[in-house]
Image (cartoon, rainbow, N blue to C red):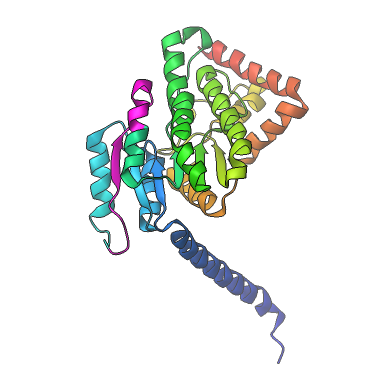
Amino acid sequence: MALPSVMVLPLLIVVAAGLYYIYNEVMQFMSKSLVRNKVMVITDAVSGVGTECAHLFHKGGARLILCGTSWDKLESLYNYLTDDADPRETFAPKLVILDFSDMDSMEDVVAEVLECYGCVDVLICNSSMKLKSPVQSVSLELDRNVMDINYFGPSTLAKGVLPTMISRRSGHIVLINSIQGRLAVPFRSSYAASKHAAQAFFDCLRAEVEEYGIVVSTISHTFINASDSPLAEGPAPIPNILAAFITSQLTHGVSPSVLANEIMQTVNRKRKEVMLAHPIPRVALYLRFLLPSFLFAVLAAEVKDSVLDD
């Protein structure tokens, strides 16, 4: 007996929802099984994204090495992860103090990280220092500090764990970068420069270590939202409404949980490059290469507008 036509669409929706649910359950199970027993290092593990990653990978049975600048915060994270955890299914994380602004300590940090388990399967470089300021207001010392945390730190740590990965012909290095490693926004010169440097370094590294079975992934996201973005105080001026819209989209962030899930998928599927951004930033990237003069004019118009508002 044929179904009435009015029932076909609801039935298709129910079937599609069921298949989607089954797919998510299977992917979640596979995600846990793929990271089980893997030695994983997470830098800035006490940040929003770091904590979300630690939670996901700890549940999946990974052997975590959590790095951060504050011992108290690391201990709090340790307690959060282990309080309700099943010791038969999970491993107690190792804690390491890591401060990329102190580059002199990096040799000792690398040694301590490798001492934990003797090797590293996955390195997640998550640390980042943001800075918003006019170029002429940024001191050389501050420039260097941003470069240490966003570029020299991750690249030095990657170099430190690389020999063990090469000897085992296995490993995965993940850089949590920014869309500003590809497209610069006004008033973020130091930040964008450091992200461009990191992107270039890890792109080069990817090609150099592929023959050893090592995967290098970069995830370029917009800004991370710890909370909802504040509403604009007033309407944008009509002449520059396009500039205001593009700039707001370029700085519109993602939540830590969404980014953490993307990191999990990147590790599991060994994807080499991920862009986590809304359509407008993606369009801006194309404009940067296809119509650079237009994009430059739009961004310059927004800068002039902000100066007039001040």
**Is 44 placed left or right of 133 in the picture?**
left
Residue 235, can we see it?
no
**Is 76 placed left or right of 135 in the picture?**
left
Q: Position of residue 276 (x, y in %)?
A: 57, 42
Compared with 127, 52 (above or below) is below
Compared with 127, 11 (above or below) is below
Q: Position of residue 23 (x, y in %)?
A: 55, 67
Q: Position of residue 298 (x, y in %)?
A: 68, 21
Front residue of 276 and 104: 104
**Is 10 placed left or right of 136 in the picture?**
right
Residue at the far bottom: name it.
1
Q: Position of residue 54 (x, y in %)?
A: 37, 48
**Is 220 placed left or right of 100 in the picture?**
right
Task: Tell me which residue sits at (61%, 32%) in the image.
Answer: 204
Task: Tell me which residue sits at (23%, 42%) in the image.
Answer: 75
Magenta stretch bounds: 88-109
Front residue of 310 and 143: 143
Which quarter of the rendering shows the N terminus? bottom right
Residue 70, can we see it?
yes
107 drawn magenta = yes
Task: Tell me which residue sits at (61%, 36%) in the image.
Answer: 208
